[in-house]
Amino acid sequence: MDLVVKAGTLVAIIALGYLVKRLGWLRGEDFRVLSTIALRITLPCALIVSFDSFEITPSLLWLSVFAFVVVCGGQVVTWIVERRRGPGAQAFGVLNVSSFNIGLFVIPYLGVFLGPQAVVIASMFDVGNALAALSKLDREDRLFSRDIVAVDMRLPDRLTVQLSEDAARAREDLFKEKKPKKKAGDA
């Protein structure tokens, strides 16, 4: 019965979020604020509470190494398999095979159903996964040489970066310059 109550609670939270959206209490612009709260407050708090009374052993560190090897191995296999289809197919395959992305989605469920120990183990696995993906991005796109302050890899089909204030201002200025000027008689 305890399992049903826990699952029901998580489903109720999802239903509440959907209801709030349908009632129009939140707008599309509110997504950024809510995702920032989830990413910068809720997730770190869940991790801190989980790691608080947990001792990190060498076997947990090996889990990060294992995840790193699994991700890199998958990338190599995909690169070899897609070789005949060309560099575009290889790049697409390597980018899409490399991520488990278990962080924000799985951690609440693990915490509820399996306890803080499961959150720690999943986090250690995700560390190896994230390091492999980041090293690939830096190697291919020189990610760390860019003027960014945060990298969000939660969505498997896209990478989102947060620019520094100076880089964001320069980007805005660039787009203002490229904006086409209206001609006389245009509506």
Image (tube, helix red, strand yellow):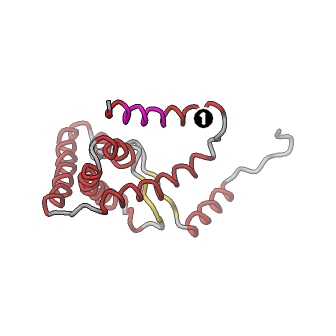
Helix, strand or loop at mark 1 = helix
Question: What residue is shown at x 14% (from left), y 63% (from top)?
Answer: 58
Chief secondary structure of the magenta portion:
helix
Whether residue 88 can be seen here: no
Taking depth in this image into account, of 25 and 9 the one nearest to the observer is: 9
- The quadrant where residue 23 appears: top right
Quarter of the image where the C terminus is located: top right
Question: What residue is shown at x 29% (from left), y 52% (from top)?
Answer: 116
Which stretch appears magenta?
Answer: 5-14
Q: How many marks?
A: 1
**In this view, which residue lies farthest toward the front?**
1
Question: What residue is shown at x 48% (from left), y 67% (from top)?
Answer: 147
Q: Is 161 placed left or right of 183 in the picture?
A: left
Whether residue 110 can be seen here: yes
Q: Is residue 9 magenta?
A: yes
- The quadrant where residue 113 appears: top left
Q: Is residue 66 magenta?
A: no
Quarter of the image where the N terminus is located: top left
Residue at the disc numbered 1: 21
Taking depth in this image into account, of 19 and 30 the one nearest to the observer is: 19
- Residue 8 position, x and y percent, is 41, 31
- Residue 143 position, x and y percent, is 39, 62
- Residue 174 position, x and y percent, is 62, 60
